[in-house]
Image (cartoon, helix red, strand yellow):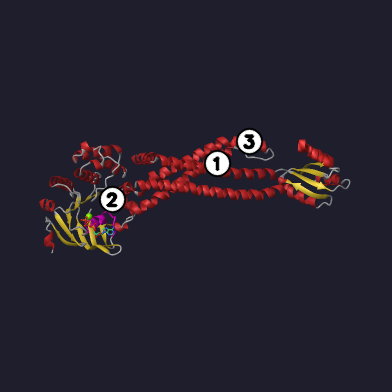
Amino acid sequence: MTTFSYVLRDAFRLVTRNITLSFLTLVTTVAVFFLMSCSILFVMNTKHIVAGIENNLVITAYVNKKGTAAEVVADKIGKLDCVDSVRIVTPDKALEILRARLGNQADVLTLLDDNPLPPSVEIKLKNASAVSVVARELLSMEEVEDIVYAGELAKRLEIISRFISKFSFGVLAIALAVGALVVFNTIRIGVYARREEIEIMLLIGATPGFVAFPFVLHGSIISALGALLAGASVFLSYDRVVGALKASMPFLNFMTDRAVVMDLWLLLVGGGLTVGWICSWLAVSKFVRQAMRPH
Amino acid sequence: MEIKIENVIKQFPPDILALRNINITIPQGDFVYLVGPTGSGKTTLMRLITREVVPTKGRVLVGGTDLRKLGMTDIAYYRREIGVVFQDFRLLSHLTAYENLTFVQEAIGMPKDLIEERTNEILDKMGLWRRRFLYPEQLSGGEQQRLAIARATINCPSILLADEPTGNLDLQTAEAIMKILLSINAMGTTVVVATHNQYIVDEFRQRVISLRGGRVVRDERKGRFEINDDF
Ligand SMILES: Nc1ncnc2c1ncn2[C@@H]1O[C@H](COP(=O)(O)OP(=O)(O)OP(=O)(O)O)[C@@H](O)[C@H]1O
Ligand SMILES: [Mg+2]
């Protein structure tokens, strides 16, 4: 009990005696953990968006303009069990949709004398696993010229997403290394400032663990506090940021689950505690072992 | 705890032979003066006992345990049995006299109320009560010396090692310090004193171990300082 209160008091003394350094370290760890959570959320959102597109169950089959090709395809495919509904989009209808989408820029369409758009069939499926089956079926029909489905787009996005993940993990690793190094250095400076005290403590019979503990606690507290504050700012601003992004990109499926962000926050604090613990332990234990080494 | 130093040779790199084949046995409760010219190996011998130094050859047994075999935590617990008055005191300059004493008790996990009680008691005994809130640099040499002894003895060690505890002190103060050491010894603590102080050694006659060039050249009960007789 006394031991523990001593350790706490000592850790507190370490923080207060070097308040500027402790504060700077805290600011750095907050920045590091903020960057880390941003890159994690970025990756999570990218994955979420890709998954959302993957789960889009509509396949568009463009068919040739010969007579009833659209009806033939619609008929055949509509009979499949896994198909929910089919809808034929005539070239006129397609042009109308395009005009609506272009809004006040629709004037450019008057430059066309002929409607170049092919007729198509929109096929809505019951489940995602059917996508590749139906896609293959469609491609085997001679009436079908090309198909576009989200799975295809998703595959392309997946590649981009994988690249983004790699990049983000790079950022993550660098941020982590910087954070770890800063905590390590702060603790080492603390250890160095008190080397005489540590040497005497060890000579009069303090155990290495007892000597090291306040430093380890100091490092862990700073690091965990940094993670806590970074997590708090992310948690509090996430909704607003995603709200703004959604407003400008409504077609993208952003992650809006607060529970996930909350989990990330907890994970961050846990990570901060672990990183702080390991780094300060490394910083102090090396010194303690050296001080205990006989001549 | 008996201290047994067996055939110890200590060579510091690159080739400084600090101790050459030392054999000494110090039973529990002994009072020993270590004498010898500067560089003869007195401090090194004491550092063998605290295990700050390990022998190049031979072994050091304390209470039957070979110190070389102890792990880091074992050493910590072992050191609680030993009080050391360092040649250069090694008081902590940013702590008051009072805190210098509580610090070493906290470091080994002593209960708080006991710490207060014992600190006050020893400050009183060492005549430092009125100086308790002063920092080491505000204390006189003799006061620092007494504070160092207080710190070394506050955890009731079985062995007290005092390296030059009367260095730079006038005879009266040196005598007062010696009386404190003798009273600690009277309570059963083994006391080893390294000293250059002829007056003290001849006045308070005890076992004298004389070192020269890293060798024991004389070891006698109720001995005298008598450096010149060594030849
Ligand atoms: N860590 C070390 N590295 C190298 N040489 C050392 C070391 N410690 C002691 N020595 C050498 O060992 C010899 C004995 O030193 P020691 O300190 O034991 O002498 P001493 O008897 O205590 O002297 P003094 O009376 O001046 O305190 C000296 O020659 C010293 O230079
Ligand atoms: Mg010496």
**Amino acid marked by disc 1:** Leu
Residue A173, position in %: x, y? 53, 49
User: What's the mark number on residue A244?
Assistant: 3
| Quarter holding ligand 2 | bottom left
Residue designated by label 2: B79
- Report whether residue A146 is seen: yes
Q: Which residues are magenta?
A: B41-54
The chain holding disc 2 is: B
Label 3 vs 1, first from the N-terminus? 3
Asked whether A82 falls inside the magenta stretch, the response is no
- Frontmost of labels 3 and 1 is 3
**Amino acid marked by disc 3:** Ala
Query: In the rendered image of this protein, does residue B218 appear above or below residue A195?
Result: below
**Amino acid marked by disc 2:** Arg
Residue placed most toward the observer, A160 or B79: A160
Residue at mark 1 shares a chain with residue at mark 2: no
Local crowd size for mark 3, using a 10 Å CA cut-off: few (<14), some (14–19), many (≥20): few
Query: In the rendered image of this protein, does residue B175 appear above or below residue B124?
Result: below
Residue B83, position in %: x, y? 24, 49
Q: Are marks 3 and 1 in contact (CB under 8 Å)?
A: no
Direction from residue A271 to residue A88 in the image, left or right: right
**Residue at (19% x, 41% y) in the render:** B126
- Report whether residue A212 is seen: no
Is the C-beta of the residue carrying label 2 under 8 Å from the nearest atom of ligand 1?
Answer: no
Direction from residue B222 to residue A168 in the image, left or right: right
Q: Are marks 2 and 3 in contact (CB under 8 Å)?
A: no
User: What's the mark number on residue B93?
Assistant: none
